[in-house]
Each structure stands twice: as structure tokens, then as C-alpha cells.
């Protein structure tokens, strides 16, 4: 599927942080903030991919900025809603040996900023637009 250095596995973030569909939106938001990432693969108890939740998904699930809710009520809302309410189920994925070209085409076609990298339904990495930029910069000089 392309030369070794043009495979997703050489540019992805290995072993990304994950969450479960039962986790709260507050937990997912805090995990993203702590680890400075914009998306989390959602896995079951066996580590199998069931979805993905992005910072954009969390924003869409949040109350409107013109709400009359207090800060306490908003935090309560975030703590009670599960990730399953905001995640994308059965996300588009790639294999570690997929080419960068294939991954980029999927990201463009589906208008997404990241792809879980899976082997036998288990998440082994995540490939994002940041990884694409690193690849381009390293191959342009």
C-alpha cells in the first residue's frame, strides 16, 4: 500500500487516550483538555472501537451560550449526559498499513479531522490533520 514511510503507522499517534460511551461529557471534555487532543475514540470493555467523540461534538451537545442556565446547572448537565449522546457511532477507520493518500482521501471525502487506526476492531492509534501536516513538512524539504 505504498512505501514504508508513507504508511499511517509511521505518522499516527499510537495508543491514544480513549473513553467509554457511559462516561460523561464532562469526563470526555476534561480528558481532551488534560491531554490536549480534539477527539477521543470510544471503546467498549474489550477495547473494541464503538465510536468517536470530538470537541466539536461536545460543543454541539452543550447548551446554547444564550441560555439562562447557571454555571452550576451547565456543569450538572455536562456531568449527567453520556458520551453516547454526542459520539459518532461506527466511525470511518484506517489500518496501520494504509497509505497516507488513502487516509487523506477518507478525511476529505467524509469531512473529518481524524481517523481511528484499528487492528481487529482494537484502537492502536489515531491519525489526524496534524499528522498529515507533519508528513507534508517532512517530505517537502
Image (cartoon, rainbow, N blue to C red):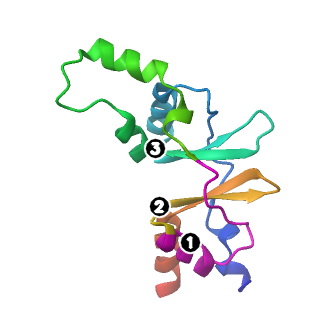
Specify the segment rendered in magenta. 89-109
Instruction: Kindly identify which residue carries mark 2.
Output: 113
Between marks 1 and 2 in the image, the one whose residue lies nearer the viewer: 1
C-alpha span from label 2 to label 3: 15 Å
Tell me the crowding category of disc 1: few under 14, some 14 to 19, or many 20 or more residues within 10 angstroms, Cα based: some
Q: Which element carries disc 3, helix, strand or loop?
A: loop
Residue at 68%, 75% (x, y): give it: 7
Instruction: Kindly identify which residue carries mark 3.
Output: 36
- Front position in the image: 106 or 35: 106
Q: Please say if 15 is above or below 113.
A: above
Tell me the crowding category of disc 3: few under 14, some 14 to 19, or many 20 or more residues within 10 angstroms, Cα based: few
- Image check: 31 left or right of 93? left
Residue at 81%, 37% (x, y): give it: 46
Where's residue 141, x and y in %?
A: 47, 87
Instruction: Kindly identify which residue carries mark 1.
Output: 106
Where's residue 49, x and y in %?
A: 70, 47
Q: Which element carries disc 1, helix, strand or loop?
A: helix
Where's residue 86, x and y in %?
A: 48, 38
Between marks 2 and 3 in the image, the one whose residue lies nearer the viewer: 2
Q: Which element carries disc 2, helix, strand or loop?
A: loop
Looking at marks 2 and 3 on the same chain, the residue that comes earlier in the sequence is marked by 3
Q: Please say if 93 is above or below 16.
A: below
- Quarter location, residue 104: bottom right
Looking at marks 1 and 2 on the same chain, the residue that comes earlier in the sequence is marked by 1
Residue at 78%, 52% (x, y): give it: 121
Residue 132 is a magenta residue: no
Quarter placement of the N terminus: bottom right
Q: Please say if 65 is above or below 69.
A: below
Where's residue 102, x and y in %?
A: 62, 78
- Front position in the image: 118 or 60: 60
Residue 99 is a magenta residue: yes
Amino acid at each position: 500500500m505504498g512505501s514504508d514511510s508513507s504508511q499511517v503507522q509511521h505518522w499516527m499517534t499510537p495508543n491514544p487516550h480513549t473513553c467509554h460511551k457511559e462516561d460523561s461529557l464532562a469526563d470526555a471534555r476534561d480528558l481532551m483538555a488534560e491531554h490536549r487532543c480534539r477527539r477521543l475514540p470510544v471503546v467498549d470493555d474489550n477495547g473494541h472501537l464503538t465510536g468517536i467523540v470530538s470537541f466539536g461534538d461536545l460543543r454541539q451537545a452543550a447548551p446554547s451560550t444564550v441560555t439562562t442556565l447557571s454555571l452550576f446547572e451547565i456543569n450538572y448537565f455536562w456531568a449527567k449526559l453520556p458520551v453516547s449522546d454526542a459520539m459518532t457511532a461506527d466511525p470511518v477507520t484506517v489500518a496501520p498499513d494504509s497509505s497516507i493518500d488513502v487516509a487523506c482521501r477518507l478525511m476529505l471525502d467524509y469531512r473529518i479531522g481524524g481517523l481511528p487506526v484499528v487492528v481487529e476492531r482494537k484502537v492502536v492509534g489515531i491519525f489526524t490533520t496534524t499528522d498529515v501536516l507533519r508528513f507534508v513538512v517532512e517530505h517537502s524539504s
